[in-house]
């Protein structure tokens, strides 16, 4: 069994944002030499997400608006977590969007449907944060 | 290490619906010959879900009503994604329900609790769409 | 390939509650002897979750309040599932929080970011329920 590990670093210049990280994960897969297996891609921080969806800017605007409706950033005083912090909403938003994805590796490629792309979702940005890529297989 | 891959095709005749796909996944597992490992089951389309819950029609009606409350289909003009499309709500609903499940394989069986069943969740149906089953192990 | 399986049992004395199960999962990993691989941790019951977030009591209070807003327990009659049951809301809450996590195993350790902790989330408690830990690798 082969095993591969890499940390990807991101710094989103705004509080919230989405980055298509599919090319970086594909590079990891090529480095790993794995042809058949599973790739885990997860946020290492608890106010960020890794998720799979469409790379379409209208949809990303819809996600932003929708997450603000389901888990509004303000008022900060609404949240018990916000004693010394102001990011309770980011923990909730990341819960909706998910911590991780597991992707099949088949024939040395990410085994995706036609529109699947992997995104890093940042909900408490303006700092350097990490994504873990772990690939196992043969 | 053994590795197995199969695509399952579904066509839901309505915009939304849930299909219990546990028997199909069990057939995949039998074909794979894997006795100990992990099975990944994921929607290959970004307006559909794979999730685990109860096979109870009342609950499924509750899911439908609840998802319409959290991410209503209409008005279509509410969503930036709906330029040439009308399925932004389907992307959001699938986000709530999840893209994928990972199930343990133990003793050549899906290692489930008493009520766990795997469902395909369709949120933009009336077309043929795929689910990927990837199983690795020994 | 090594493979390890263990069931963890929990009984939360209230309807809802969160338990940090990271130490138990770490014990499983030590028992497994796996140094590189993947660990799947999932609720075996469909009204409970396993998720990763911060071990901070204010945040947990925020989760409780937020989940009650998104999927209220009452009125019970609001839900079609509640014919002979009263736990439809627990199925919905668990859907938001997630059934499972997949964690990388690297150098015989759970490969976590600085604040990641694994929680059991109970939404229909006062009974004994199980979490499955499945670890594969080498």
Image: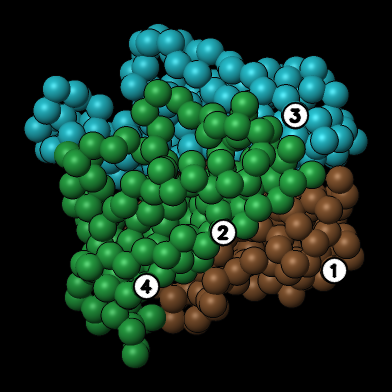
Chain colours: A cyan, B brown, C green
Judge if badges 1 and 2 mark residues of a common chain: no
Mark-to-mark CA distance, 1 and 2: 23 Å
Q: Is residue C57 visible?
A: yes
Give x and y (percent) for residue B99.
Answer: 59, 49
Mark 3 element type: strand
Q: Which residue is mark 3?
A: A3
Nearer to the camera, C108 or C16: C108
Label 4: chain letter: C
Q: Secondary structure at mark 2?
A: strand
Q: Residue C49 lies in what quarter of the image? A: bottom left
Discs 3, 4 touching: Cβ within 8 Å: no
Q: Which residue is mark 2?
A: C6
Label 1 sits on residue: B30
Residue shown at 60% from the left, 39% from the top: A101
Q: Is residue B133 left or right of residue C122?
A: right
Q: Position of residue A48 (x, y in %)?
A: 42, 28
- A134 with respect to A35 (left or right): left
**Would you name the residue on which mark 4 appears?**
C128
Mark 4 crowd level (few <14, some 14–19, many ≥20, 10 Å Cα): few
How far apart are the two marked residues, 3 and 4, measured between alpha carbons? 36 Å
Question: Is residue B102 visible in the rendered structure shown here?
Answer: no
Quadrant in the rendering for residue B105: bottom right
Tell me the CA gap for discs 1 and 4: 31 Å
Residue at position x 56%, y 41% from top? Answer: C30
Q: What kind of element bears circle 1?
A: helix
Q: Residue at x 18, y 34 (%)?
A: A81
Image-quadrant location for residue B18: bottom right
């Amino acid at each position: 069994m082969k095993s591969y590990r890499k940390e990807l670093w991101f710094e989103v210049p705004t509080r919230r944002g989405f980055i298509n990280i599919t090319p970086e994960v594909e590079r990891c897969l090529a480095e790993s030499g794995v042809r058949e297996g599973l790739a885990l891609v997860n946020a290492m921080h608890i106010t960020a997400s890794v998720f799979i969806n469409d790379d379409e800017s209208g949809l990303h605007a819809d996600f932003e608006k929708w997450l603000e409706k389901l888990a509004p950033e303000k008022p900060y005083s609404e949240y018990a977590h916000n004693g010394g912090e102001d990011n309770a909403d980011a923990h909730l938003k990341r819960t909706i969007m998910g911590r991780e994805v597991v992707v099949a590796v088949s024939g040395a490629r990410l085994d995706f449907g036609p529109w699947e792309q992997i995104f890093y979702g940042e909900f408490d940005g303006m700092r350097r944060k990490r994504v873990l890529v772990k690939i196992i297989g043969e």
